[in-house]
Each structure stands twice: as structure tokens, then as C-alpha cells.
Amino acid sequence: MIRRASALAMLLTLTLPAAAEQVGARAKGGFPESFFMEKVPRAEANATAEKLARAVMAARMIIFAYAGKIVDPTLGDKGLSGDALESQWRSAVEPDLIDASPSQKKIFEKLFWAGRQVMDNNQERINTKGVGWKNFLPAKWEREMGQVFAARTGIIIKQPGRAYRSPMNAPDDTERAALEHYVKAGHGENKPLTSFAKWGKQEVYRHMEPIRLIPACLGCHGKPKGEPDMLGFEKDGLEAGDVIGVMSVTVGLSD
Ligand code: HEC
């Protein structure tokens, strides 16, 4: 028995590398400069990130206004096509584009394009008759829009959550620190947290601001904590005004 065990141990040391490499670990390095199709001059980084964050919040609100229609099983066409979203979104964002630089305007065209694509992609889903919950929410639109927008521009727009539902909304270290800051600071603290960072060879500007709950959100993110919401997720136990996530914008710098 002892001899068999030691023979097995010998076999293992022969076949396994000394320190086994972890499988499923994140590759080191990465984020090459070529990933960033749209970059902004350092002097414009702050205003660009702020305008992008405001624009995405505005689109969330436009979509949220359709929430009642979207979950109505008796309705077919909900009137929220890509075009319908885009035209309302452009009017909402117009004041912010008046003083936009040419590079900001170019970025915004790609933002509207991404938002429209995602809305068009979801038409079949939201216009299905006879079903109440269709798994379409402002947060879902934003997650998908962020991916399409990042694929085209390299600018990353995310909404990491304090108890995230989608794994895509898991915070990185900087985002987690921002979440902790806003949770600890309480309702009055809305000043964005900004920083510069180096991603591979590329310097980036990061902007984070709190996303706060309004009464209409509490059916899923409110009380009692732990009780299933209508989708089966555990409710967060939060109140109106509490931070639920951060709007996180990362832009590459051109100088
Ligand atoms: C019907 C239930 C429901 C309501 C109402 C709701 N949410 Fe959510 N929320 C979700 C679900 C589900 C997700 C995951 C969406 C996804 O990524 O597909 C989510 C995701 C989020 C996220 C991203 C972090 C995460 O948890 O993944 C934020 C931020 C967020 N919601 C804020 C809000 C705000 C603000 C409101 C009100 C304006 C609101 N939600 C209303 C269900 C809800």
C-alpha cells in the first residue's frame, strides 16, 4: 500500500509541472493602443466623459418611460424603434452638443448609432405579444449599447453595480473603490470621481459618478432585502436616493 502510494507520488511529480499554471486566469498585459479607435485630447477628456455619462443617463430615462408599455402583454408594437429612441435621445442631448468639439461630435454620432443598433436588435423581443416580462430594461440596453459602442470606438461605458445582476456589470478595482466611496458618503455626494490610468501603452481617463435609485426602481432594487423581485433576483433592500451602481466611462487620450 505504502509502496503503491509512493509510486503514485513519483508518477505525479513526473507528469505535473512543479507549479501548476492556473487555468482560466486572466492573461497579463493587454489593451494595446490600437484598440482605441476614438481618443480625445487630454484637455477634452473631462468634458467628453461627463457629456457621455449624461447622455447615457438621458437615454435610460427615455427607455424607462416605456417600461409600462413594454411589459404589457396585450400590446404588439411598442413604438420604441431604434429611430424613435434616436430622435428623442438627440433632442435630450442637444444642449450638451452645442459646445461640443469636432472629436466629441464624432464620438456622439457613434454613440447614437450604437444606441439605435441595440434598440433595433431588441424589436422582436419587446414587440412580442402575449408575454409580460420580456427581459428588456434600461440597464440591459445600456449594457448592450456599451459593448457595441466600445467595439466601434474603444471608449468603455459600463454600469458596475453594488450587487450586480449581470456578470458584465462586475466592478474592477477602481469601480469598486468608487462604489464604496458613494455608499459610505451618503445621499449628498454626487461629485464624479476621476483618475488617469495606464492600460498597456495607452493612457486613459476614467470618470465615475453615482447612479441613484428613484421610487420606480424599488420593485426590484428596494425592500425587503433578499426577497425575490419579479424576476427572481434577490432585492437589494435599498431606498430612493441610495446608490445602486456607478456610471463608469473610460476614454483613451490622444496626447
Ligand atoms: C423589473 C426589475 C427592475 C427594475 C424596476 C429596475 N431594475 Fe435595475 N436591474 C434589473 C436587472 C434584471 C438588471 C440586470 C440587467 C442586465 O444587465 O441585463 C439590472 C441592472 C441594473 C444596474 C446595473 C448593475 C447590475 O445590477 O447589473 C443598475 C445600475 C440598475 N439596474 C439601476 C436601476 C435603476 C436606477 C432603476 C430605476 C430607474 C432600476 N434599475 C430599475 C432589474 C430592475
Image (cartoon, rainbow, N blue to C red):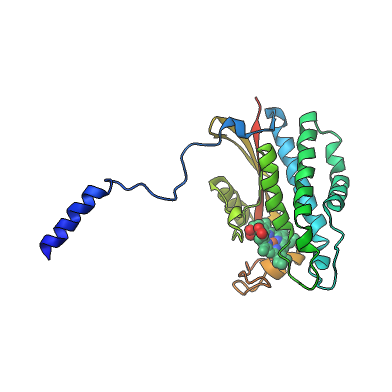
- Above or below 32: residue 176: below
Residue 170, given in percent of the width and then of the height, sits at 57, 54
Residue 133, given in percent of the width and then of the height, sits at 73, 69
**Which one is in front, 122 or 95?**
122
- Above or below 177: residue 68: below
* Residue 122 occupies quadrant: bottom right
Please state if 36 lies on the left or on the right of 217 as rendered.
Answer: left
* Quarter of the figure that contains the C terminus: top right
Q: What residue is shown at x 75% (from left), y 51% (from top)?
A: 118
Q: What residue is shown at x 88% (from left), y 48% (from top)?
A: 87
Please state if 118 lies on the left or on the right of 5 as rendered.
Answer: right
- Above or below 116: residue 226: below
Residue 86, given in percent of the width and then of the height, sits at 84, 48
Tally the marks: 0
**Which one is in front, 54 or 139?**
139
* Quarter of the figure that contains the N terminus: bottom left
Ligand 1 lies in quarter: bottom right
- Above or below 60: residue 19: above
Residue 58, given in percent of the width and then of the height, sits at 80, 51
**Which one is in front, 39 or 24?**
24
Whether residue 199 is visible to the viewer of this picture, yes or no, is: yes
Q: What residue is shown at x 71% (from left), y 28% (from top)?
A: 43
* Residue 90 occupies quadrant: top right
Whether residue 244 is visible to the viewer of this picture, yes or no, is: no
**Which one is in front, 225 or 116?**
116
